[in-house]
Amino acid sequence: MIGGMSLVYVVMEALHVQKRWSFVVVGVALLVYGVLVARQRTHSWRDLGFRLDNLSAGLLPVGICTLIASVGLIGWAVALGRPLLGNQILLLLALYPIWATVQQLAFQGLLHRGLMVLLPVPALQVLVTAAAFASVHIGNATLVALTFAACLMWSLLYRRWPNLWLLAGSQTVLAALAYPLVLGDAPLSRL
């Protein structure tokens, strides 16, 4: 399901379909899949990573990793001579959490958890998850590299502290910095 939705998303991007329609298609498909999962009772929301019990334990490691990656992105922007202030970052911080939660549910809660059952080697589970996440960003080599590295980090964190709220927060911060500062992009302009 996740692989198929990733492929649909990549095709829609290649055809330059407006983001709002990509989000609707992916959102509806994940909603239908979520309803099916809930009806079959194969995964609880807690199992997927919508948890509060490990929030305080995971906050520091996820926060430190996010801070280190953020400093790297800001350093990259400084090296590129990009302005560090702008309303694009604040707008992304406000609007991106929903999309980040959907992506973390898809790639960590569903794909990574499934790979933990299917593939016996943890390193392969992490690498396949990161490669799948990076593949939906095909079209920009820098973004593919950034998302691959970020998903490696999130996958490793998810294995120890399976908390989608924390990972979505991390993804929101990193995306809010990466798009305008490193990529020089305003992804919300394509909605």
Image: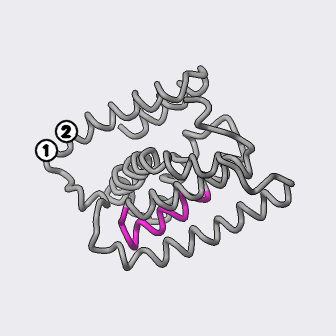
Q: Position of residue 50 (x, y in %)?
A: 29, 59
The residue depicted at 64 percent of the width and 71 percent of the height is 68
Tally of marks: 2
For residue 12, side relative to residue 111 (left or right):
right
Amino acid residing under circle 2: Leu
Where does label 1 land, which residue?
Answer: 40
| Magenta span | 149-163
Residue situated in front as seen by the camera: 175 or 123: 175
Note whether 25 is above or below 47 in the view shown.
above
- Residue pointed to by mark 2: 36
Q: Is mark 2 on a helix, strand or loop?
A: helix
Residue 159 is a magenta residue = yes
Front in this rendered view, residue 110 or 171? 171
Placement of 17 over or under 137, stated as above or below: above
Q: Label 1 near label 2: C-beta < 8 Å?
A: yes
Q: Which residue is drawn at 40% across and 55% down?
A: 108
Could you say whether the residue bearing mark 1 is in a helix, strand or loop?
A: helix
Marking on residue 68? none
